[in-house]
Image: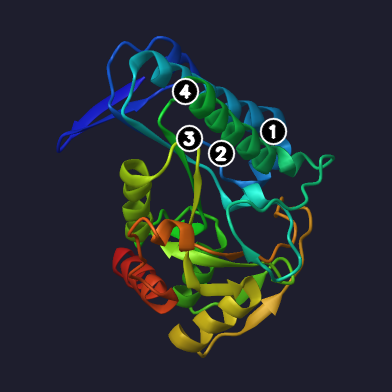
Amino acid sequence: MFKGNYDGLTFIECDLVTYLRNLESHYDYIIHCACPTWGQYMSQFPVETYTLVYQSTLGILEYAKSAKVRGIVYVSSIEYYGQVTSETMITEDFQGYIDMKSSRSSYPMGKRAAEFLCVAFAKEFNVPVRIARPTQTFASSVSSSDNRVFNQFARSIINNEDIVLHTLGESAKPYCFITDCIDALLCILLKGKNGEAYNIANDETYTSIFALAHFLRDHFNPSINVRIEQHPDMGYAPVTKLIISSRKLQQLGWSPKYGLYEMFEKLINYMRADN
């Protein structure tokens, strides 16, 4: 187990489920983000993906019940909504199709199971847990090894290389900058209702992967091209079109500050300076 203290923050690297079983410290607030996020890992290790999501959430909720914590936010995902192919407004009560025979479904199914645990503990034991469903979120300081699509596109811009899509790029969703997301999580933690879910997204940034690639090429490096080289075996989520509504969250007083151009401008400028 690694421990470190930096500017008042203590970092503990450990097996989360084991740590929770032996936890003696008291915490007033918890934001639970632990989960695998790499598509290939989810496909290759569906049991580990699903059980970590479920068991870590159960452990935190049981601790919260006994310790009488003041507030919890469970960070879920818009993959909770499953596969949506019609462009309809997605509010928090919506559910789409999830393929139960796909190992990649270990992630969205785990999220749904964990969310139900949150609702159950809120209803039966009055545990003050709320649910956040953030869309694709990123910061300016992203690891160079991060293989998510926004980071791949930014690297291509900086390296003066063509943007290569491994799918047709049909999936579409909005985006959110990290500081907007942190503001949202704190807003949900302090103002949200127990057992309720809240979408986190800048509604105005909705775009497909294909359109995003062209947007970034046009705005940041018009000299490169956008090419499609399909690789269906890389563990990508099925095609979805998630027009996420953050109206419920905005009714708590939250609003996003960063648009799509500003998000990527910060990311690309940071990556250039870091090279």
Q: Which badge, 4 or 1, comes first in the chain's sequence?
A: 1
Q: Nearer the viewer, mark 3 or mark 1?
A: 3
Residue 226 position, x and y percent, is: 63, 81
- Give the residue at mark 1: 45
- Give the residue at mark 2: 36
Contact between marks 2 and 1 (CB within 8 A): the answer is yes
Q: Nearer the viewer, mark 2 or mark 3?
A: 3
Q: CA distance from mark 2 to mark 1?
A: 10 Å
The reply, left or right, for residue 149 in relation to residue 32 is right
Q: Amino acid at mark 3?
A: Ala
Q: Which badge, 3 or 1, comes first in the chain's sequence?
A: 3
Question: Residue 273 appears in which quarter of the rendering?
Answer: bottom left
Q: Amino acid at mark 4?
A: Leu
Query: Residue at horizontal 70%, vertical 37%?
Result: 106
- Give the residue at mark 4: 61
Q: CA distance from mark 2 to mark 4?
A: 19 Å
Which of the numbered marks, if any, corresponds to residue 34? 3
Circle 3 crowding by C-alpha within 10 Å: few under 14, some 14–19, many from 20: some
Q: CA distance from mark 3 to mark 4?
A: 14 Å
Residue 1 position, x and y percent, is: 36, 19
Q: Amino acid at mark 2?
A: Pro
Q: Residue furthest left?
A: 7
Residue 261 position, x and y percent, is: 41, 78
Circle 4 crowding by C-alpha within 10 Å: few under 14, some 14–19, many from 20: many
Contact between marks 2 and 3 (CB within 8 A): the answer is no
**Element type at marker 3?**
loop
Query: Residue at horizontal 39%, vertical 45%?
Result: 192
Q: Which badge, 2 or 4, comes first in the chain's sequence?
A: 2
Q: Amino acid at mark 1?
A: Phe
Contact between marks 4 and 1 (CB within 8 A): the answer is no
Q: CA distance from mark 4 to mark 1?
A: 25 Å
